Image (tube, coloured by chain):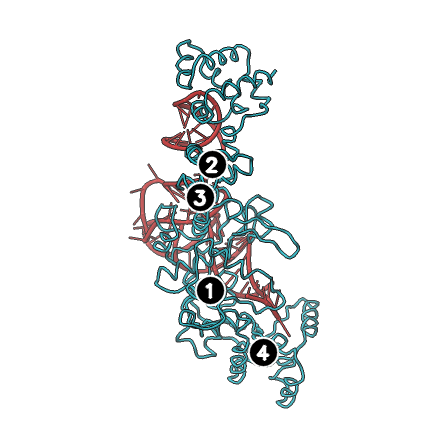
RNA sequence: GGUGGGUUCGUAUAACGGCUAGUACUCAAGAUUUUCAUUCUUGCAAUAGGAGUUCGAUUCUCCUACCCACUACCA
């Protein structure tokens, strides 16, 4: 959900400002490769109606070869491997970065020792001169280690006591002193790949990115990114940044997580997602949400149009979107409101489309002979009682098949001897619901008691559609048949 | 611990420094209906706390509290 919302805001911003929305796959962590994730992302965005202008071709594949429409290919960072090394070296040559030869074990040890003393180990100007790197070792030694070893990294040489002044489209001006920051790894020899920080800056520059709209968790990295642009001499074309508020769990504190959804009965994924352990997480699509509703509710989580309008199509969102209406604080997700959106979209849907969606459900329940016209009429009658198409069957099943049993509580309340007698007479002495109602009125019988008695026989319960509506679909003869069955069954 | 960000009804949010702090969801009550649902009406409910600036602060400044993120050879 959070990822889709970030993509959505990027898309809205791009389209609103006449720009392009580019999809780039940032897969620089070889240990965290998840099969199928890339396809999932593209399919999910496509379901939402978010189609990248660049980065994905007509077949929904990430573009690997540059063309006029995709000038910056390839769009997978794992395939851009060869690009980054020179930029890492360039930083070292310029004195902005250095080669570090500390092993993971050495660093872990240093961290543990610092912790034992109640301190925090920070890899920066205070510690780098005591560690093994190209700043402390002689040049020949560095050259030898670079050649012999395959586990070195390039680290950014974070300056000491420099104030980085930054601007965020959502949060305004922010200042951070570099002394509190550390020497982040930019390039990993072991993988021959950059980390996010280097890859992101280099690719944004190369791909001519003008705005970076991403989650709030990236805010602490912004100073580093600013400094990287400065080190490369790219400040003139540096993109503008916007850090979005987080999506929070509905109850309690913290970021919305995979677990929350299934625990509380709402999806956290756009589409069903099966992880490597074989666990399946619910998706909005499979749970019966319309993509329009999903996009709409996501858009309203952290943004508002400045008016009281709540229902927006994707095109309307593009038109209304403005980054300065994005809020700063995290947004708790409200499952009830999510359902409300779907309910609103369900009502707006065309009866014909809904009937088409309902027919397979009917088939699953063994109903194959219903005419399309009838299904459409049924849908028109019941759609405002439902939130999802999946609710339809539960609401109107008795229009297609007779009840086999009757709710005990309802029967005890309404199936009283004198009511049954009146109901039977009214039903059998007339030929339609209208005549029957007139008959009961003329006799001055209690309408509610008699009607509920009949409804119980038709639907198996005391709740449901109006008798006239039910009889319009099942016919008078079927109603009489059901009543007789009820009389035999309920004692 | 350190750094950064944040804080308006339960939730999402609105309010050039100026009306009784508005709207939606949820919830409650009432009306309508042959039941249920729908619909309609009404209601409950908030500026975290404290200073300061100001004729006037939800809005600006500072302090406190609380929440969140980051603090990996993850993104």
Q: Position of residue A81 (x, y in %)?
A: 55, 75
Q: CA distance from mark 3 to mark 4?
A: 49 Å
Total labels: the figure holds: 4
Q: CA distance from mark 2 to mark 1?
A: 37 Å
What residue did someone put label 1 on?
A56
Host chain of mark 1: A
What residue did someone put label 2 on?
A386
What residue did someone put label 3 on?
A341
Nearer the observer, B18 or A479 = A479
Q: CA distance from mark 4 to mark 1?
A: 31 Å
**Sequence-first disc among 2 and 1:** 1
The relative height of residue A100 versus residue B13 in the rendered view (above or below) is: below
- Say whether marks 3 and 4 touch (CB < 8 Å): no
In this rendering, do the residues under marks 3 and 1 share a single chain?
yes
In this rendering, do the residues under marks 2 and 3 share a single chain?
yes
**Sequence-first disc among 3 and 1:** 1
In the image, B25: left or right of A136? Answer: left
Q: Secondary structure at mark 1?
A: loop
**Sequence-first disc among 4 and 2:** 4
Q: Nearer the viewer, mark 3 or mark 1?
A: 1
Q: Nearer the viewer, mark 4 or mark 2?
A: 2
**Sequence-first disc among 4 and 1:** 1
Q: Position of residue A387 (x, y in %)?
A: 47, 39
Instruction: Please rate how many residues cluster around mark 4, counting C-alpha atoms within 10 Å: few if below 14, some from 14 to 19, many from 20.
Output: many
Q: CA distance from mark 3 to mark 1?
A: 30 Å
- Residue A403, disc: none
The answer, for residue A383, to whether it is visible in the render is: no
What residue did someone put label 4 on?
A154
Q: Colour of chain B?
A: red
Q: Nearer the viewer, mark 2 or mark 3?
A: 2
In the image, A376: left or right of A122? Answer: left
């Amino acid at each position: 959900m959070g990822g889709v919302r970030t993509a959505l805001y990027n898309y809205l911003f791009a389209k609103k400002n006449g720009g392009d929305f580019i999809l780039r796959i940032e897969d620089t962590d070889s240990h965290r490769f998840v099969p199928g994730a890339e396809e999932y992302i593209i399919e999910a965005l496509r379901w939402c109606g978010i189609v990248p202008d660049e980065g994905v071709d007509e077949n929904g594949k990430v573009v690997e070869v540059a063309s006029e429409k995709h000038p910056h290919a390839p769009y997978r960072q794992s395939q851009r491997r060869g690009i980054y090394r020179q930029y890492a070296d360039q930083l070292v040559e310029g004195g902005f970065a250095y080669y570090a030869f500390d092993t993971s074990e050495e660093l872990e040890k240093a961290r543990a020792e610092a912790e034992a003393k109640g301190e925090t180990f920070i890899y920066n100007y205070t510690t780098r001169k005591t560690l093994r790197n190209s700043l402390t070792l002689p040049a020949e030694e560095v050259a030898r280690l670079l050649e012999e070893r395959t586990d070195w990294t390039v680290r950014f040489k974070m300056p000491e006591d420099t104030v980085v002044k930054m601007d965020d489209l959502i949060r305004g001006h922010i200042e951070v002193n570099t002394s509190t920051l550390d020497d982040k790894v930019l390039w990993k020899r072991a993988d021959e790949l950059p980390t996010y920080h280097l890859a992101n800056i280099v690719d944004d520059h190369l791909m001519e990115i003008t705005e970076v709209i991403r989650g709030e968790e990236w805010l602490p990295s912004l100073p580093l990114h600013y400094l990287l642009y400065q080190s490369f001499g790219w400040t003139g074309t540096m993109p503008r940044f916007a850090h979005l508020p987080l999506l929070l769990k509905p109850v309690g504190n913290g970021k919305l997580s995979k677990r929350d959804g299934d625990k509380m009965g709402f999806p956290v994924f756009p589409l069903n997602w099966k992880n490597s352990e074989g666990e399946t997480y619910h998706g909005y699509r499979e749970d019966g949400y319309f993509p329009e509703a999903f996009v709409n509710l996501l858009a309203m989580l952290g943004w508002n149009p400045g008016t009281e309008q709540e229902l927006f199509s994707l095109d309307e969102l593009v038109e209304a979107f403005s980054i300065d209406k994005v809020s700063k604080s995290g947004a708790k997700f409200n499952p009830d409101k999510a359902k409300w959106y779907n309910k609103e979209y369900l009502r707006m849907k065309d009866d014909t489309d809904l009937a088409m969606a309902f027919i397979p459900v009917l088939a699953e329940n063994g109903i194959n002979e219903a005419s399309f016209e009838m299904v459409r009429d049924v849908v028109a009658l019941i759609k405002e009682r439902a939130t999802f198409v999946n609710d339809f069957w539960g609401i109107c099943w008795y229009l297609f098949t007779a009840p086999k049993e009757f709710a005990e509580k309802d029967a005890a309340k309404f199936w009283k001897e004198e009511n049954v007698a009146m109901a039977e007479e009214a039903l059998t002495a007339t030929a339609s619901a209208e005549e029957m109602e007139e008959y009961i009125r003329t006799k001055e019988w209690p309408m509610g008691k008699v009607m509920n008695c009949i409804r119980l026989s038709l639907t198996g319960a005391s709740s449901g559609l109006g008798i006239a509506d039910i009889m319009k679909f099942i016919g008078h003869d079927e109603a009489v048949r059901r009543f007789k069955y009820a009389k035999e069954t309920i004692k």
